[in-house]
Amino acid sequence: MLVVFLLVYAGMMLGELPGLRADRAGIALLGAIALVASRRVTPEGAWTLVDVGTVALLFGLMVVSAQFRLGGFYTALTRRLAARDRSPERLLAWLVVAAGALSAVLANDIVCLAMAPVLVEGCTRRRIDPVPFLLALASAANVGSAATLIGNPQNMLIGQTLHLSFAGYLVDALVPSAAGLAIVWAVVARAYRGRWTREVEVSQPLGVPFDRWQTTKGAAVLGAIVVLFLFTPWPREVIALAGGGLLLASRRTASRDVLELVDWQLLVLFFGLFVVTGAFVDSGHLARVTAEAARAGVDVTRLPVLFGLTVVLSNLVSNVPAVMLLLPASTHPLSGPALALASTLAGKLFIVGSIANIIVVEQAARLGVRIDWRTHARIGVPVTVGTLAVAAAWLWLRV
């Protein structure tokens, strides 16, 4: 049990295991299979360890995000932003606001995946450097996604596991998220002041044609989902699945086209980690570790310790595995917002700290725009330090 757990979390830290070509999702799944095959966990027990509500919520919202992508909404919005006759600083401000707001209600990874190539195209046409805008896109998507319980996978997991109120969490997270977007703009604008121009060649047409009907339909379903989240006690996973089902029941769009845009890798990662982490918790190993830490003066249930440990683990093993490991110790009334804000905002420190960062860097590289770790760190480090400081101060005031 302990060996499997350590190997899986080592894989989360490294992104791979020596001698294998398995990524994080594959490693998590292999860990779950190893526990079942070694009879440490029964097949029935493995299913009970999976939080079906979180997986269902994640899947339903992925379908909604896919609808916007198929409707060409992200493409049309990004092109419209880039085409406006604005100064680079004003364009940057509009981009930060748009990416942050979209990421609060749609999956931030999808926002980055859809907007990054079109952003490069728009910057090229205006003969301005796309790098600061790409870095702002990734940063704003991360920060904006912290504002709600549906902005990113770890927030969905936290909200479902700790049974947090959608509106209540919004009150706790909206101020630091909004302040964080302002920090993103200020850091990028200062770092690239007077250095906005750059020639970049894009050799292929990009984006998806805009479909007003498909986009309107997606917006109507998303709006209904958010209203129901805010004002009804209905289970969020049921609401999200119902919304996704309405979009899949289409006469114009084949369901396979929508389902192809669902991040099945992320769902597999959740499944594997639920089994491995759940088995580790049930075995009593986690309780013994936290008890020893408490005796040494490190009480994980205290909010400052939980916040700091979340930041560290999120950069070591990624935010979703870190959150799964720390959820059993989240007993403070504000532990949910602390976990969500710390795990999300910490992801800007390094490129590998967030899937959104990786997506933007990879999308840019395909179009000939290189963003190395030093370039990212010039923005990522001050944004991470600034946003975490604001979040910590806000939580202290809330306490």
Image (tube, rainbow, N blue to C red):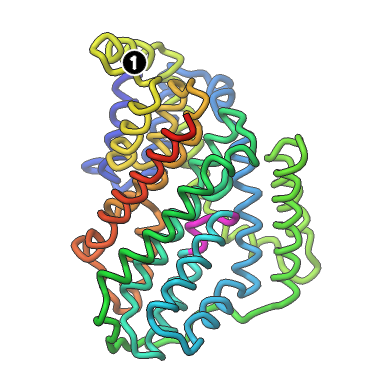
Q: Is residue 7 above or below residue 65?
A: above
Count of number-bearing discs: 1
Which of the 4 quarters of the picture holds residue 375?
Answer: bottom left
Residue type beneath disc 1: Thr
Find residue 388 and report its image quarter.
top left
329 with respect to 174 (left or right) = left
Report x, y in % for residue 179: 44, 54
Tell me, yes or no, if residue 36 can be seen here: no
Identify the magenta region: 105-111
Q: Secondary structure at mark 1?
A: helix
From what the image shows, is residue 364 above or below residue 3? below
Query: Observer-nearest residue: 191 or 251?
Result: 191
Q: Nearer the viewer, residue 136 or 152?
A: 136
Residue tagged 1: 290
Q: Position of residue 253 (x, y in %)?
A: 72, 68
| Quadrant in the rendering for residue 88 | bottom left
Residue at image position (30%, 48%) is: 21
At horizontal 47% and vertical 82% (from top left) the residue drawn is 82
Q: Residue 303 placed where, x, y %?
A: 40, 26
Q: Is residue 45 visible?
A: yes
In the picture, the quarter occupied by the N terminus is top left
Front-most of 264 and 161?
A: 161
